Image (spheres, rainbow, N blue to C red):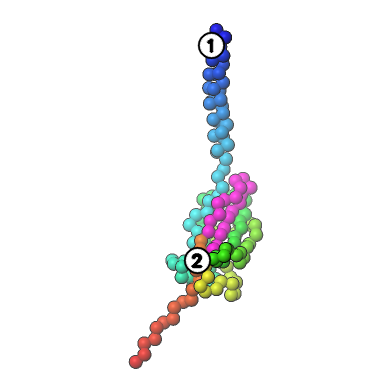
Amino acid sequence: MGRNLRLNIDIICLVLFLAFGVRTINTKDRSQNPVEIIDLGILGEFDTRQYINHAPKFQWSLSDTSGNLQMEMIISQLGDSGDSILWRSGTQEYGGNRFHFISLGALLDGNTYLFSIQLVSPDSGWSVEESISFTMNTAPTTPQIGL
């Protein structure tokens, strides 16, 4: 009889754990997901391997715009020996879904750059960083036909 009682207690403990333990784990999993950055791109550009505008306008969408959002943006130059940060915004209030980078002479032809953005919400923490790379180039000259 003692053996059956012990077996019944073990089964009851297992059932209670499965009933309440799993619910507790699922409650933690229901926490808010971080805001997602969607469709990051450069306005007016279709080929980021041949970008000619030295003042790029970046644009993106968000999965959720409610809440008190902050953001950080970085522009890095990509190189064989590693990336070097060219510009960093620091954490600042979210200012909308566009950013126009204007800096005379900062983006040089032939170099590849990476624009990265990350958002943070007090409720859900930091989002996954999204980025887009682009290579600067000069506009091709119009060929001259000599007669």
Front in this rendered view, residue 112 or 39 = 112
Q: Are marks 2 and 1 in contact (CB under 8 Å)?
A: no
Helix, strand or loop under label 1: helix
Residue at the farthest front position:
81
The amino acid at mark 2 is Phe
**Mark 1 = which residue?**
4
The amino acid at mark 1 is Asn
Residue 129 marker = none
The residue lying at 58 percent from left, 75 percent from top is 105
Front in this rendered view, residue 144 or 57 = 144
Magenta stretch containing residue 118, yes or no?
yes
Report the span colored magenta. Answer: 114-131
Residue 40 percent across, percent down from the top left: 50, 59
Residue 2 percent across, percent down from the top left: 57, 9
Q: Which quarter of the image is occupied by the C terminus?
A: bottom left
Helix, strand or loop under label 2: strand
The residue lying at 55 percent from left, 73 percent from top is 108
**Mark 2 = which residue?**
134
10 Å crowding of disc 2: few (<14), some (14-19), many (20+): many
Q: Main secondary structure of the magenta part?
A: strand
Q: Earlier in the sequence, mark 2 or mark 1?
A: 1
Residue at the farthest top position:
1
Locate residue 3: give its quadrant.
Answer: top right
Residue 129 in sight from this viewpoint: yes
Residue 119 percent across, percent down from the top left: 59, 53
